Each structure stands twice: as C-alpha cells, then as structure tokens.
C-alpha cells in the first residue's frame, strides 16, 4: 500500500485553519462546487455508496445505504448532524469542528445535496463551547460567501445549517434520542421502526450522520470511491481518526487507515505505555465496546476484526490504555457508574440493570463482594440491550459489554479481589460515594446514606 | 389572587426577542425549548420555575412540557450558580490518570462541596462525565470554554486563580 496521506486532519496544524480563506486556499469547497454544478444528487449518493463509507459514529452502518433508504416521493427532508460526542475518551469530532469547521460544512452541503435536504441541524453537545463558537462563525462566513442560503452557486439548491446545542446527556447521541431532543422533548430514543429515514425529525424523513462520516464525503467526491477503497481493510475502508488516551505517553488524536493494530497505535502513535509499563487492557472504541486484554493487542481496529476477541464493535475508535498496575475492579466500577448515570430511564432493564450493576460494583469495590455477584452481574448483562431484545436503544448493550468482556477475560482477578477485600460493612471509599452524590466528604460527609450498608 | 411579583414578567423583552428569533429555525415552536432554556440560563445563571412558565407562553406549550424537558438534562440549576462553572471529569481516561482526587482537592481549596458555589459567587464546581477533552486528561472545563489539563494539584490551584479572575469568552483556539 502506498504511503498513507492524512486527509481529514490535513489542515489541523495550518494557522487559522478555521477560516474560510485558509480552507479555500487549500482546495476547500471544490468538491461541493463540482457536485452542485455538475452532478445529480443520486449520482452523489451512488459515489458514496460505491465507496462503502461506513458511519464513524459507532455502529458502522453504510452511509450511502442510509441515504438511499429515504422514500423517493418525499417532499421535505431533514439532515441532523450528530456532534453530541459523549462516549468516554472520544474527542475526534471536537478537533474536527474546532480546527476545520469548513470541512464539516462542505460535508454537510454534500450530504444535504445528495439527500435533498434543505435544512440541517447540527446537534453539538454543550460542553464543546469553543467548537460551537467556531462553527457559528464558520457558518456565517460560508453564508456571506454564498455557500449557504438560497440557490447556492446557481444550482437551485438551498441550505440552512442551524447549530442546536445539547445540554449534557449521553443518550442524545443515539439518533432518535437526538431527534427527540431536537424537537424540544426529553432525549428518549424512539421505538424503531419507523426508522428516521421514513419518519424522523418533525415526523419527516431524516438522515442522521456523524461529523466524521460527513467530513469524509468531500474527499470521496474529490478523489473518487476507488481511492477511498484503496485505504483500510476489507469491509472497513478509508481513513479513521483514532483517539488515544489513558496510560500512554502521548494522549492524541491521529488519522490512520482503518485496521491498524492496537499495539501499533499505542507504541508508535501514543508514545508507548507510560512509565515504561506494559498494557494490561485496552478499551478499543469508547467504553461501551468492551475491552481487549494485553495479549489481544494485535487485533486490528476495524469494523470486522475487532469482533473476534469478543468486543461489541469499533465504536468511536477511542482507545483507552490501562497499564499493568490498573485494577480491573476500578475499570468496571467506573464504567458501571457512567452507565448508571447516563441511562435515560425509559426501558426498565437498562434503568434498573445499570443501577444494580453499579450498586453491586460499589459493594465489591468497597470490600463487601461475593463470588455470586459476578454471576448475577453477568446475568443482568446478558439480559439487557437490543441484542436480547429488551430495550429500545443500544445503550444497555454498551453497558453490558464491559461486564461480559471483563468476566470472560479477567474473572480470576475479580474473584481474587473479592476474596482478599472483605472489610465487613465498609463500602466503597467515602470519596467515591461523594463524587457520585456530588458532595465532598472531607467537609461534611455524604449527603445520603450509603446504599447496601450492612 | 395574583401578587405584584407575578404580574411583572421575569423575562425582559430583550430575552423574549432572543427566544423568538429561534422560532423560524424549526417547523415546531416546541423545538425552541432547549435554546430558550439556554438563553434563560445564560442570563440568570439558573432556570427558575417562573421563567419556564414564561417560556411555555412564548412557545405555546404547557409549562409542564418545558419542565419535563428541563429536568431531563442535568444541566439547568434552579438556583443561580456562580459566575463561572467548572466541570471536572471523572470518566475513564481522567479516572485512570488521577482525576477523582483532584476534584476533592479543588473542593477543599474552594471550601465548597461539588455542585456548590463559592461564597464570593465566583465559581461553581461540579463533576462531569466525559467532557471530550481526554487529550488533556485529567481535565477540567470552564463554562466560558477554557480547557484545563493535564491537571495536578498545583495546576488545580492555578486553574482556580485563573477562573476567579473572571470569564474569558474570547479564548478561541
């Protein structure tokens, strides 16, 4: 394979990369000009379909196919761009929006042109404050230059992009949760079908795409589907932004061809595990995707290979490294707490399951665990999610996967921990409880009684 | 019987105008709920019940619907928060690199609990789930957009001084 040339991140280190002037000077908006003036929307869909671009948001659904699900006789289409990136240790969309907002705008233009949408809602999580400001400025700039608004480039195509800010809810990254939130309701995912392509935002056909997915589109149109398919591994084509964080020397986001191994990512791009230690475990794509153990590091991080060691999928390709001194109990406790906090509460198996798993982990961590707890947690994990068919969205699958993987790969460590950590009525540390309650024990003690105290 | 306080609207004409400006963006007025809550929150540093009622009137929905949406997100406080809000991350990357004890350190330094505001009304400190700034882990985010990290105890102290000095809205990358 030829030397890999980064495309998504090519402008990141250019001064003033967030301005229209710099973006255009580096060949920006050429794909949009070409598509709007010379191509048919269906042709754009076909090119993206041919490239086999898979969604970068987590599920890896083919983007072109998603676009072609829209009903042919539709009158109005909405585009929603999912920038509610909240998966722990993922930050690639933030950098894409902060450093190259016009690349995203061009991607949105092409996506909307292909799907005949004239309104796009860019749902940005509230915490991306700088990204929001940069985007607002970039959209205004593009509008002033005639790249947004009515009759863009004389093609008869109209487009308005509105930035819609979230309010700190993980579940709004689920596409129908996002749509509900956009409509001004609580972000509860909808039962599918109908899928958003048939009935989405404001009950109209809607496409929901991830930021990184759309950022790939201008490059596909510029260089062709064959170029895109020359990068990556079978069924997982194209460049991907990998985020590396945790116990590494360099916490960065790098663009690489899909299918790099976890080992290469850590050793070459993350500067190796910190303090000269070894990796004990690696989260391959945000915590909901499960966990790779230290001897599975040669797994390719693409949409297919990652399933072989039992992970849920590639997810957001956010790699979190844990060194050999990390306790897996701490890891599982942290993920359980995250999902207990972020479950939206709509489906009982998820709401109760996540909460009970968290309580159980809290007790284990505090020195009150029983071996049977591990089986109970596994049973809960096996019975919540879309896969066993008990919930509406995939949050519960994501909550269950770390448990399934941890039990399959690190069960002896948990048993050992339970046997050696029996400190009677003492629960998790006061600080841990306090952080969950939002209080600081050093000053006044926990505000609520500790659950499950003997 | 209506009291005098109830007769004077809480939201000024200027705020109402800001909210109304969002209405043409969406096919339904209800979709403006979240932008309206953000506008009110930005102005009052909280979303009081009366403001929700007035938002409901502008958007022609019920106050309960506004409250339903508001209360789903852990974002909107009912009592005013400080001039700047700091979120400290407790999710996996920050936890692994030592984030949790730093929240305790920051709280001690500020003399408040997590979720509370300092007596000079300058800083509200809270924990947060992943803030998407893991390249700075362990990290904190101020609600004017400033990112702090990678933190240690000394840097938490410096962050508190920085934030206490005032908001910096122009801090663009």
Image (tube, coloured by chain):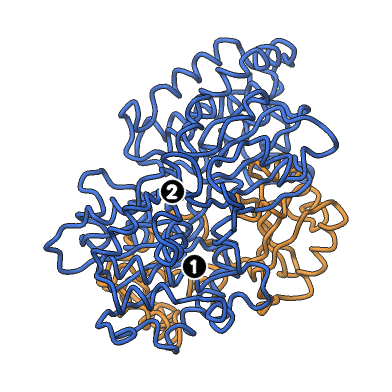
Chain colours: A blue, B orange
Tell me: residue A186, above or below residue A133: above
| Residue located 40% across and 61% down the image | A224
Classify the position of the C terminus of chain A by image quarter: top right
In the depicted view, which residue is nearer to us: A278 or A161? A278
Percent x, y of residue A230: 47, 49
How dense is the environment of label 2, judged by Cα within 10 Å: few (below 14), some, or many (20 and up)?
many
Chain at tag 1:
B
Q: Quadrant of residue B53?
A: bottom left
Of the numbered discs in the image, which one, if any, rests on residue A357? none
Q: Would residue A373 be found to the left or right of residue A369 on screen?
A: left
Q: CA distance from mark 1 to mark 2?
A: 22 Å
Residue named by callout 2: A171
Instruction: Report the number of discs.
Output: 2
Looking at the rendered structure, the secondary structure element under dot 2 is helix
Chain at tag 2:
A
**Is label 1 or label 2 in front?**
2
Q: Is residue B68 visible?
A: no
Q: Is residue A8 visible?
A: yes
Residue named by callout 1: B47
| Residues tagged by mark 1 and mark 2 found on one chain of the structure | no
Asked if disc 1 and disc 2 are in contact, CB closer than 8 Å, the reply is no
| Residue lying furthest right | B154
Tell me: residue A396, above or below residue B84: above
Tell me: residue A135, above or below residue B68: below
| Residue located 65% across and 40% down the image | A320
Percent x, y of residue B62: 28, 65
Q: Would residue A148 be found to the left or right of residue A117 on screen?
A: right
In the depicted view, which residue is nearer to us: B138 or A301? A301
Looking at the rendered structure, the secondary structure element under dot 1 is loop
Percent x, y of residue B168: 70, 77
How dense is the environment of label 1, judged by Cα within 10 Å: few (below 14), some, or many (20 and up)?
many
């Amino acid at each position: 394979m030829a030397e890999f040339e980064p495309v998504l991140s090519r402008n990141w280190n250019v001064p003033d990369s967030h301005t229209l002037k710099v973006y255009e000077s580096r060949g920006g908006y050429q794909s949009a000009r070409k598509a709007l003036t010379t191509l048919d929307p269906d042709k754009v869909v076909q090119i993206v379909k041919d490239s086999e671009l898979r969604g970068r948001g987590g599920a890896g659904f083919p983007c072109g196919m998603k676009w072609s699900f829209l009903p042919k006789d539709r009158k109005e289409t909405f585009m929603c761009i999912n920038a509610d990136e909240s998966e722990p240790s993922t930050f690639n969309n933030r950098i894409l929006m902060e450093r190259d907002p016009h690349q995203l705008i061009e991607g949105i233009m092409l996506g909307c042109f292909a799907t005949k949408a004239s309104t796009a809602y860019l749902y940005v999580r509230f915490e991306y404050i700088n990204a929001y400001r940069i985007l607002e400025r970039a959209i205004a700039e593009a509008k002033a230059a005639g790249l947004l608004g009515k009759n863009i480039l004389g093609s008869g195509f109209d487009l308005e992009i509105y930035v819609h800010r979230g309010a700190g809810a993980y579940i709004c990254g689920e596409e129908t949760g996002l749509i509900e939130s956009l409509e001004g309701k609580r972000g509860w995912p909808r039962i599918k079908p109908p899928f958003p392509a048939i009935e989405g935002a404001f009950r109209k056909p809607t496409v929901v795409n991830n930021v990184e997915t759309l950022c790939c589109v201008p490059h596909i149109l510029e260089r062709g589907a064959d170029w895109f398919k020359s990068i990556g591994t079978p069924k997982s084509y194209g460049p991907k932004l990998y985020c590396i964080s945790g116990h590494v020397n360099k916490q960065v986001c790098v663009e690489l061809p899909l299918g790099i191994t976890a080992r290469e990512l850590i050793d070459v791009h993350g500067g190796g595990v910190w303090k000269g230690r070894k990796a004990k475990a690696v989260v391959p794509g945000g915590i909901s995707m499960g966990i790779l153990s230290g001897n599975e590091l040669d797994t390719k991080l693409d949409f297919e290979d990652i399933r072989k060691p039992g992970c849920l999928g590639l997810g957001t390709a956010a790699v979190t490294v844990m060194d050999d001194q990390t306790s897996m109990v701490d890891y599982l406790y942290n993920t359980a707490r995250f999902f207990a906090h972020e479950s939206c509460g709509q489906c009982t198996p998820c709401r109760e399951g996540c909460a009970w798993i968290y309580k159980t982990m809290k007790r284990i961590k505090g020195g009150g665990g029983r071996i049977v707890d591990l089986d109970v947690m596994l049973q809960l994990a096996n019975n919540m999610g879309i896969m066993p068919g008990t919930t509406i969205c995939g949050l519960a699958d994501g909550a269950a996967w770390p448990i399934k993987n941890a039990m399959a790969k690190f069960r002896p460590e948990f048993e050992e921990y339970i046997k050696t950590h029996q400190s009677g009525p003492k629960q998790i540390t006061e600080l841990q409880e306090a952080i969950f309650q939002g209080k600081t024990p050093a000053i006044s003690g926990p505000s609520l009684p500790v659950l499950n105290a003997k | 019987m209506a009291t005098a306080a109830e007769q004077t609207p809480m939201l000024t004409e200027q705020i109402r105008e800001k909210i109304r400006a969002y209405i043409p963006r969406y096919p339904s007025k209800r979709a403006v709920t979240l932008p309206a809550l953000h506008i009110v929150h930005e102005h009052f540093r909280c979303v009081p019940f009366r403001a929700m009622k007035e938002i409901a009137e502008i958007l022609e929905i019920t106050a309960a619907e506004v409250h339903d949406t508001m209360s789903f997100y852990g974002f909107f406080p009912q009592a005013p928060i400080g001039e700047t809000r700091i979120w400290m991350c407790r999710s996996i990357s920050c936890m692994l690199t030592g984030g949790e004890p730093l929240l305790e350190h920051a709280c001690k330094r500020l003399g408040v609990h997590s979720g509370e505001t300092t007596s000079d009304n300058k800083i509200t400190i809270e924990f947060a789930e992943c803030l998407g700034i893991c390249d700075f882990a362990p990290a904190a985010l101020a609600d004017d957009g400033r990112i702090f990290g990678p933190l240690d105890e000394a840097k938490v102290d410096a962050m508190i001084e920085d934030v206490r000095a005032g908001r910096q809205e122009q801090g663009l990358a």
